Amino acid sequence: MMDAMGWLTRFGRRMLMLLRRRQFGADLAEEMRLHQELCEQEQVKQGASPEEAHYAAQRRFGNRLALIDKSREMWGWSWLETFLQDARYGLRQLRRNPGFTAVAVITLALGIGANTAMFSVIYEVLVKPLPYPQPNRIIWVARTQPPFPPHWELPFSGPNYLDLARLNHSFQYMAAMFYGDFSLTGHGEPQRVIGEQVTADFFRVLGIQPVVGRSFLPGEDQAGHELEAVLSYGFWQRKFGGSRDIVGKTLNLNEQTYTVVGVMPRGFDYPSDADEMWVPMVVPKTNRGDNSYRAIGRLKPRVTLAQARADMSAIARRLAAEYPKSNDREGVMLVSLHERLGQFIRPTLLILFAAVGLLLLIACANVANLLLARGATRQREIAVRAALGARRRRLIRQMLAESVLLALIGGLAALVVGYWSIELLRTLKPNDLPNLAQIGVNLPVLWFTLGLSVLTGIIFGVVPAFRISGAQVNDALKSGAGGRGGVERGRTRSILVVVQFSLSIVLLVAAGLMIRSFARYVGVDPGFDSHHLLRFGVTAPESKYAGVGRLEQFYRAALDRIRALPGVESAATSYPLPPAGGESDGGFYVEGHKPALPSGEHDAIWHLITPGYFHTMRTPILRGRSFTLYDMEKRRPVIIINETLARQFLRHQDPIGRRLYVEAGGGNFATIIGVAADQAYAGWDQIYSNEVYFPSARLPWMSFVVRTKMAPSALGPEVRKAIWSLDKDLPIVDMTTMDQALDRAYGPRRFNMALLLAFAALGLSLAAVGIYGVVSYHVLQRTHEIGIRMALGARKRDVLQHVLGQGMILALVGVGIGIGAALGLTRFLASLLYGVKPTDPITFIAVSLILVAVALLACYIPARRAAKVDPMVALRYE
């Protein structure tokens, strides 16, 4: 915001300088003309004829005057002078009507401000180039393979990545990435550090150099090399106070010693804004079935994306021929990194931007209605100016200048509204919105707001300008409110109200669909009881817990100590823990029913859990039994499947005792001992998946879930002490309640719903104000007629019904047009909806009733006032 204010200050100074230059040019031209006249008079006194004196002075001063006039015209002073003259007059008019000005400015500030805020988000996420040298050459490289959809970005195996990096002729550098989770000890309390394991060319691909020290050198990602780390700027400042002596210092990460070699610049956070360090990674040269590595590359100069795609596709076909078992039907997808970073949020942002565009159109219609109403009071003024010789084009230009001036004032207020909106956006913290910290009111946003303000002023000003300037002079001079011009303005205002209601119903239907979708989303049974559940994770260093069964012994001891705490009902571990992401999957088939296709058709999410997990989560076992400690200790080949898998692949058969071949853990047959209710592991959008549970806790990263008899958060300190009593160097990660975790999972949908609902509420309010203004104006215009009707015997009820009918006709026409438009437009919302169709009849009916009710209320107030008109007062009304 400070940068924006600084730019506005510099812009103001520049305009002031130009205005002074304009005034100087005008003064100089006037002075030159005065000298020319004096010269002519002097020559006449000396005996020259007036014609000779004029031509002599013209030859002397004419070229200089023409140069001054040409210079002023080149700077655009002719139109600028006219606009400034009209703007000064318009400013006086706005000052004379503070009520009208305040309502119009507030309306425009809301409409333009919402667009300013949304544009700032879209600019930062979708438009602004990435902060890397030649960002268009940085490419995201991913694997494709049926039956997964073509747009899914699958990771590579280590050997496949190495072959692609070695054989391609398109990339100057390529780098692989793998998520890193580290336990930092030796610097106070044990701390979890989120980072990234990368190959040595990672920073060369992005073209970023450290601000302190160096990045990784070629060969430092090979086995046997000394372990090194590059820190993020934020982590360096928080943990080490920004000391430049950090280079060469050592860190104890996962019980291994890493040497710090550099610090990245402020703001560098790729691939995740949570990354705090980067360490070299050794890419394995075996096991082409372990697809775990993401890749990026920098194109060579003069190599196009199409050429690179052809090159990589040829390599993929070659690998598929050489390794058909693992690489069958594999392809390579290349996408610009900039396009890839915004591809998931792009549809949502564009839909929200369209929503604020509709809101701005509603605001424009509202202000146009205000201008038409105000035009009735200025009708005599316009008529007098026309009678004195002002042409219609000059009157239109004057009124458009006033409209643009009004819009510019609204645009200034919109900057404040936009800034507040962005701060509110940061407070909401939508977890699917990248670069949230960088979003703000910057120079491109200022230009957008300025251009939008001018365009808005023209949009809402052009119709009133043509209508008001087209009034008949004689009629206007006879009566300020009557005549054909008043009828036409009334018709135009009615059309604008219909437009407002049509646009409002589109916004309301979109918001209603989002509300219904969110209600369905949160109403889905997650398959467990989230109340009184505490969850957290640990990352045990593999080097410290190497050896058969050591990890399981640690988890068992930790669970025993947690269960012994007062207020704990039960506890267990799991990987993964809902609501997650991060799950692993693998192929499976029922014994005797091996699928024809090699893999992918029958996939299941696999879970490692300890006995007591289902009891702690309160997930019912529908058939069979749960795991016991004996199953875990003896490593029995037993599994529990979920209801979805049993229904799809075993149908009417009894699953208990059947054997399932699962690829997880090297591939073995395991006996089904139970069927558990479905749990929403992969998110509510993808429920329910095939799931297989194993009795194990052999992973160094596991999640704990604890059911308590008290508030879960109150038990947090005691649980930490219980873990640290076994290992004081073990960091505890993301300790929170399950209810809070679910709340985070709902975040993106709640955010979309809240924004659309806010835009719809503003649109509805503006539409209600618009119809209220039209009906009030209608009553005012027909006060004399109403008095005559009542004097001739019309009852108050008749007048009330008549006025209400006039307003409700407009509302119903707007609702009808809006429903038709909504039926065509809401299909673009399909990707944001869950469990609701874009043509949901309940939503359309409910929204229509709400809008009709609001219109009825807005019409009732002026109608009631009309019914109370005193006939004697009305008959004397002018």
Image (spheres, rainbow, N blue to C red):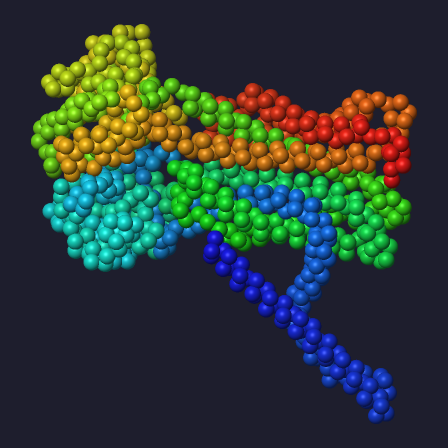
Q: Is residue 877 left or right of residue 545?
A: right
Asked if 318 appears above or below 263 in the picture, the reply is above
Q: Where residue 431 sits: x, y (%)?
A: 39, 37
Residue 197 relative to residue 70: left or right: left
Residue drawn at x 26%, y 51% is 236
Residue visible at 44% across and 31% down in the picture: 749
Residue at 12 percent across and 37 percent down: it is 543
Q: Position of residue 150 (x, y in %)?
A: 37, 33
Q: Is residue 607 visible?
A: no
Along the viewing direction, whichever of 337 and 530 lies nearer the viewer:
530
Give the total of numbered labels: 0
x and y percentages locating residue 828 in the rendered image: 52, 32
Foreground: 205 or 717? 717
Q: Is residue 622 left or right of residue 439?
A: left
Question: Which quadrant: the C terminus?
Answer: top right
Does 371 sit above or below residue 755? below
Most extreme residue toward the bottom, as rendered? 46
Residue 297 visible in the shown view: yes
- Residue 166: x and y, percent? 23, 47
Is 877 left or right of 520, judged from the image as shown? right
Q: Can you tell which quarter of the image residue 577 is in?
A: top left
Residue at 71% x, 47% y: name it: 462
Please tell me whether residue 652 is drawn above or below residue 742 in the rendered image.
above
Dividing the picture into quadrants, the one containing residue 104 is: top right
